Amino acid sequence: MNINTTRTNTHVLYESSLAKENVDESFDSEQREVKSFSKKRWVQDKFSALTKRIRGLACILPDSSHRKASQTIPERKVSHWVTTDAFEVPDEARSRVSETFTAVEVAERFRNTIENLLHRLRYDEIAMEYHEDDQREEITGIFIDFILCQEGLVHDRCFTVENSPDKYVAGKTTSQERIKEIESYLDVIFTEQAAEASKFNKPRLRYSLGDMLVDYLNKKENVPDDVTPKIKVTYDFHIYEITYKKLLKEIYPFFQTLLAGRGFFSELVLVFNCAAKYRRELIDSACVPCKTGNMLTIGLRLSESDVREYFNRSVMDVIFSGRCDGIVNAMFEGCSQTDNEVEPVNRPNLKFGEELEYDVKNKFSRTRGRLCNGFSFLLKEKGMVLQASNDKRGPHFGFDNSFTVVSFYDSEDWFEINCTPYHTDDQRAKLSFQKVIEATDSMRKEGLIDYSSGHKHVDAMSATQGDTSVLLAMESEIQRNPFLLRAFGNNDRILQDDEARWYKTFADYNPDTKPFALKRLNRIIDRYNKKIEENYTERPSHKVSTDSENKERLEEFAHFYSQVVHMTTIQKGIGFIGGDIMGKFMAMSLLHITGASGVNKLSTLEFRFFRCPKSVQEIELINQFLQTWFQYIHQCRKDKIPLQPVPEDIQSSKDYTAAEVQLKTIDYLSKLGLNPEHYRCFWGEVRDIPSATD
């Protein structure tokens, strides 16, 4: 598209007619022009501004003032420099056509260019998100740095404001020709955004950072909009047209989800390149009936082609490689380890939380609120009292407000009970659980509910003591011992209903994802073990990290591991696809540490492979298992015992025989120092179930 053909009168920058601006009028009468930038009023002398533009930037002939966006870069030619009737371009300015410009000079020129566009096109708001107040000065700075980073003039970094001159790459310059090419891209994207807003009669003209970045990349890479739009009809007969423009709008939100706002300039380019390369496949996937969700997320989850594998290899592997060493190095910061530490690790005082889940057994009990009302009535009968609470899920009951329980529906298929976080020595919690079990037993006998899952939450700080290597060690243990998924009461559900998909290990991943997950975990383990081999110790003077620093480090590791190793955003979908809800379905989910989309931030680890406990004793046994497990991991960390990698051919939990599961579970419990007989109530339920084809 030749951008000069339709919008020349309103937006073209640095055109040869620049000198014609009011040259026939008195400079005294039109000497100053008020402009708005970053909500500040500033006045600029038009004559001096004009002179400055001609000296430093020169003018461009009308027929070549902007290159055609449809041309590839090698086809574009340098524009000619001219003189005008009103002003004569100095010789030194004319000679700059062959000169290069420093990053600082280019940044200032682009800022003037964008400022002029915003003024001419009457933009109201430039912000991080469309609903936010105007932040044009800050956003413009980030946007310019992103552009310059693509040109090798600014160091790669996150999308944050950076005013230090150190951000520029020393000694790097760029040509006048390239500057003018980039200015043509800017002209196009800002003008097209304004035209789009005008077409839909939007009351305010806005541009978000994400859309600016993606639109710029799309124009710079000259990606054709050659995908036939797809029509999506919803169940209520609404018709939606899925287009390439719609896909472009989804790229930056996906990028933000993937890297939690910590993504680098270069990493956004990787995501964009993948989306552009597979735009047809992603748009086709978006037409599959599903809940509202990001097109890239849905496309990567549903794709049966090579999209997901390409994304893993060309995007995720690059992101992983760039961050792996930093993640491992952080495990050795802020915690002093010396060779004379021989005392055993004390048993960690874990803080627990419960998700007691029950299957709803008949249509009558699915009536909204019926089970909750019945449960509340039974608790009152047993002496528990309604406690004050603002929880929208339902009423809280307890003997006092120090420990309470709340019931609600987790969809119409599951009845769930949550509780206040507690320690194992909390007698009020133990008494309350006794009453809860008695109430649910009554409901089970009436055929209203049956046992489902017993997700156990563990406060991350109490479990790790701020040491992220504990999370890595726990992952190594879980991924190397997938039989544990069947050892704690879920044997029949895994074999008959493939329920391990709701709390899977890497052994349960689909074939195009499993190798990447195992490779990345094992690489982290390898880096960690090399640190151990180096007999790494902190300097005695090193400041021990604060709780806030430890929490920040835990969040950073949890997000990195969940997105890049667990691959929670791009796992192949199961059942009815939603936004990001698929991500929790791991044997140990870390998403509650970070508070991912659709997941409450509780700063907890969620162990999802336990059956719903049938008694208070079973609750206590699971607590004991977890406390001993974490104590074992802390002791290995203190003793600098290397972690074991996960075999590439690790088998799924459902591939073990019942005898293998029982024998391995007994051995594992013994290794931890626990009495296996105490856990027979769980592993004793393991049995072989012939498949329908046998």
Image (spheres, grey):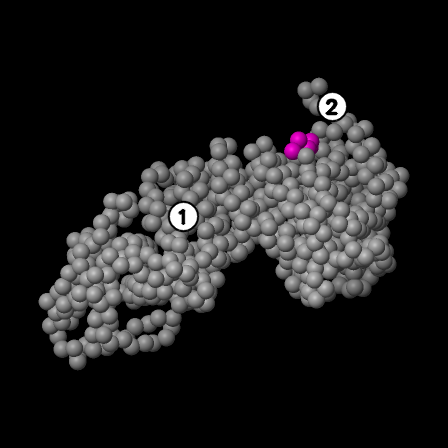
Give amino acid for label 1.
Answer: Leu
Residue at 82%, 61% in the rendered image:
399
At which x and y percent is residue 549? 65, 63
Prevalent SS, magenta region: loop
Residue at 71%, 47% in the rendered image:
533
At which x and y percent is residue 20? 14, 67
Q: Nearer the viewer, residue 299 or 518?
A: 518
Q: Is residue 496 above or below residue 576?
A: above
Would you call the spot at circle 2 few (<14 residues within 10 Å), some (14-19), or many (20 or more)? few
Give amino acid for label 2.
Answer: Pro
Q: Nearer the viewer, mark 1 or mark 2?
A: 1
Residue 120, quarter of picture: bottom left
Is residue 220 shown left or right of residue 491? left
Residue 332, quarter of picture: bottom right
Residue bearing the label numbered 1: 248
Q: Which residues are magenta?
A: 648-652
Which image quadrant: the C terminus? top right
Residue at 63%, 54% in the rendered image:
329
Q: Nearer the viewer, residue 298 or 480?
A: 480
Instruction: Inspect this view and state whether residue 130 appears.
Output: no
